[in-house]
């Protein structure tokens, strides 16, 4: 795969890349491909860091993924936007938790519990 230069991408392209990586991560988790999952996690983190470097408005672009058909995309977007849209992100996480769609419902539940008990501090 060709190396992607995140700094050259538009915000919309970064959001699309985030969704693509989330879907690939969902598949890797489904098939127990731990090293692939971890590699994708690092790539998603790089996309998130690029959005953060571009400011609040760029980070808020991830809110467009709240209605994505893939549950992994929604949970990852909600987690990454807790620092800039806490109420909206929490609603998404609560809906995912209530759906009982695993493993994303568990991820959402763990984040909510961490928020409630102060162990998780969004940035």
Image (cartoon, rainbow, N blue to C red):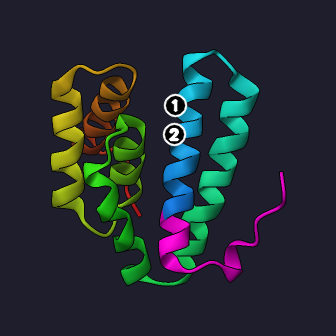
Residue plotted at (66% across, 43% down): 40
Residue plotted at (55% across, 68% down): 14
Q: Are marks 2 and 1 in contact (CB under 8 Å)?
A: yes
Residue plotted at (38% across, 53% down): 77
| SS type, badge 1 | helix
Q: Which mark is residue 26?
A: 1
Judged left or right of residue 54, residue 110 is left
The reply to whether residue 116 is in sight is yes
Residue 119 in the image: state x and y as whole percent: 37, 42
Residue 36 in the image: state x and y as whole percent: 73, 32
Does the stretch in magenta take in 27?
no
Q: Residues within 10 Å of mark 1 (few under 14, many from 20)?
A: many
Q: Which mark is residue 23?
A: 2
Q: Choose top left, top right, bottom left or bottom right for residue 58.
A: bottom left
Question: The C terminus is located in which quarter?
Answer: bottom left
Q: Which residues are magenta?
A: 1-15
Residue 94 in the image: state x and y as whole percent: 17, 38
């Amino acid at each position: 795969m060709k190396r992607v230069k995140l700094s050259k991408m538009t915000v919309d392209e970064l959001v699309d890349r985030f969704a693509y990586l989330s879907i690939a991560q969902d598949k890797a988790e489904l098939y127990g491909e731990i090293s692939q999952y971890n590699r994708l996690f690092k790539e998603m983190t790089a996309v998130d860091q690029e959005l953060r470097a571009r400011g609040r408005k760029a980070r808020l672009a991830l809110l467009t993924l709240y209605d994505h058909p893939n549950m992994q995309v929604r949970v990852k977007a909600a987690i990454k936007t807790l620092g800039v849209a806490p109420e909206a992100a929490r609603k998404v996480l609560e809906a995912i938790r209530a759906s009982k769609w695993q493993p994303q419902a568990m991820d959402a539940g763990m984040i909510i519990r961490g928020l409630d008990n102060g162990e998780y501090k969004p940035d």
